[in-house]
Amino acid sequence: MITIRDIRQSLITEVFKNLSLNDKASKEIWAARVWEVLEKSYKAIGGLGGTGFNSPDDMVATIPFWKLRVKNGDEIIGLILYKDAAGRKAVAIGSNGKPDGRKAVLGMMKDDLSRSWAEMSKGALGATMRIIPWADLKKFVIDPLKVQEMMPKKDVAPVDDAFSNILLSKFPVLRPYAYTRTIGGKVEMKVALGKPGKTIS
């Protein structure tokens, strides 16, 4: 005989967990799993770096807002972490590397365009261009001069016509919005997307 409990246990459940400034205890519970997802997600590009990402404890102490997509109670399939920098800014994105995780993260990124902003490059930028029509995405692209204003201490430099990049070749509509920054000693091309100025409450 199949009971209601058996049915409930067989269901796959997914929920969002939003951990903000006052959720230090909850962040400490999730920190090791968040760290594991991020390490795997950033391994191919040399690892995760920057302020707040020296260790799980540093992440708990420094990164104010975490959005986790959790499956079956304790499995993180996708996540985005945010700092308060010219508004709510996504600073780390990761998934479990499986189709469900990639789908979850792309959905989170799409939903976030109207409530946060992010500097995108490489895989994240390419994926965004593929899933969101340019007619819809264009209203969320941030001019490089505005990015300079938002991050005056960073070496933001708009790209010129001679700058070569695979993504710009594939998506030439991005060229007016592309800029470079030196991160970890490497010059990287980025495009900023979203809505700055929405602070983390």
Image: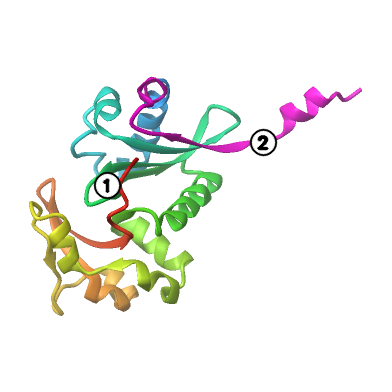
In this view, which residue lies farthest toward the front? Answer: 201
Say which residue appears at 40% left-offset and 67% top-offset. Answer: 129
In this view, which residue lies farthest toward the right? Answer: 1
Q: Quadrant of the N terminus?
A: top right
Give residue 102's mark: none
Say which residue appears at 42% left-offset and 61% top-offset. Answer: 127
Task: Return the x and y of residue 62 as percentages of the image width and height.
Answer: 24, 31
* Category of crowding for the residue at label 1, using alpha-carbon neighbours closer than 10 angstroms: few (below 14), some (14–19), many (at least 20): few
Quarter of the figure with residue 60: top left
Depicted 193 relative to depicted 164: above or below: above
Task: Say what amino acid the circle numbered 1 marks.
Answer: Ile
Which residue does the numbered mark 2 point to in the structure image? 12
Give the foreground label among 2 and 1: 2
Say which residue appears at 26% left-offset and 39% top-offset. Answer: 48
Task: Tell whether position 199 is magenta.
Answer: no
> In front: 104, or 16?
16
Task: Tell whether position 10 is magenta.
Answer: yes
* Category of crowding for the residue at label 2, using alpha-carbon neighbours closer than 10 angstroms: few (below 14), some (14–19), many (at least 20): few
State the SS at label 2.
loop
> In front: 13, or 45?
13
